[in-house]
């Protein structure tokens, strides 16, 4: 079955960086677009970024554009999120998620990795 | 940005009864709306996509309806495991999909 395992979260000061990873298994990783979605306490989920199956197309939420970079290594079945210039409002649990076919719904999620940005 | 507003924020219902959750979009999303369930310590789980299609493995007691700006998730007869938080999500203006703020379904 589909398994997504995130890592790399933690505590960072404002302005610092973190790199998240998501190891995928149980499906043909190199045929699916992959997303990052975050969930902050007391709020609804927020879509963060998407990367196409071969990595050539990337889109970002306005709130992270210019600061975050999504990438993937299909040889390692791994998705990444490089987060630079972190802000306190980036504090959330970050999930990698697989899309439902070519639709922008998310039918498989990892367990999430928490990111806390605080001085 | 399309804003999704869910109501009520908290819904108290007894097991075995029907629950009706609402989601209103700030502009039409046609039929491109889905629903998720989230339990404590778990990621969201896709229940319904494109208004009324159940995701794999979702019981028939979950159903969705609506179009344009007004949508409803109905749980016909609540089981103990259904008490959770529910989110709606639109994919109309992909890639910038948005979610509602959630409805907490609690035991009455």
Image: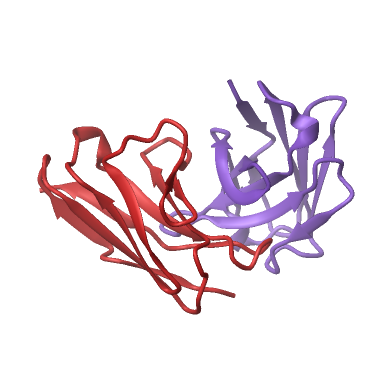
Chain colours: A purple, B red
Measuring 58% from the left and 34% from the top, which residue is drawn there?
A: A110
Q: Is residue B57 above or below residue B11?
A: above
State which quadrant residue A84 falls in.
bottom right
Place of residue A40 in the rendered image (x, y in percent of width and height, measured from the top left): 50, 54
Q: In this view, does B101 lie above or below A41?
A: below
Horizontal placement of A48 versus A19: left or right? Answer: left
Q: Nearer the viewer, residue A15 or A54?
A: A54
Q: Nearer the viewer, residue B62 or A87?
A: B62
State the quadrant of the N terminus of chain B. Answer: bottom right
The answer to whether residue B65 is left or right of residue A7 is: left
Query: Residue B79 placed where, x, y %?
Result: 19, 35
In the displayed structure image, the side of residue A114 where residue A42 appears, left or right: left
- Residue drawn at x 82%, y 64% is A66
Q: Position of residue B24 (x, y in %)?
A: 39, 72
- Left or right side of A61 for A3: left
Residue at left 73%, top 51%? A50
Question: Can residue A51 be seen by looking at this rendering?
Answer: yes
Count of all numbered marks drawn on residues in the image: 0
What residue is drawn where x is 55% and y is 39%?
A: A107
Q: Which residue lies furthest to the bottom in this view?
A: B27
**Quadrant assignment, res B78:** top left
Q: Which of B4 and B10 is in front in this view?
A: B4
Q: Position of residue A13 (x, y in %)?
A: 68, 53
Residue A119 visible at all: no
């Amino acid at each position: 079955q589909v398994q997504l395992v995130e890592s790399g979260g933690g505590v960072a000061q404002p302005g610092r960086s973190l790199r998240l990873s998501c190891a995928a298994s149980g499906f043909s990783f190199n045929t699916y677009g992959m997303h990052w979605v975050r969930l902050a306490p007391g709020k609804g989920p927020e879509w963060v970024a998407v990367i196409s199956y071969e990595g050539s197309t990337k889109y970002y939420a306005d709130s992270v554009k210019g600061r975050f970079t999504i990438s993937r290594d299909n040889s390692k079945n791994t998705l990444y999120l490089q987060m630079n210039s972190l802000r306190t409002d980036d504090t959330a649990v970050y999930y990698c998620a697989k899309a439902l076919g070519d639709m922008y719904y998310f039918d498989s999620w990892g367990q999430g990795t928490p990111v806390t940005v605080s001085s | 940005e399309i804003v999704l507003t869910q109501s009520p924020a908290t819904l108290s219902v007894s097991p075995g009864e029907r629950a009706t959750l609402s989601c209103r979009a700030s502009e039409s999303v046609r039929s491109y709306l889905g629903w998720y369930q989230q339990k404590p310590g778990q990621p969201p789980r896709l229940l319904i996509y494109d208004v009324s299609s159940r995701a794999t493995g979702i019981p028939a007691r979950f159903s969705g309806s609506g179009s344009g700006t007004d949508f409803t998730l109905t749980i016909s007869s609540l089981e103990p495991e259904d008490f959770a938080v529910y989110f709606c999500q639109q994919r109309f203006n992909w890639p910038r999909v948005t979610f509602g703020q959630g409805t907490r379904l609690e035991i009455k």
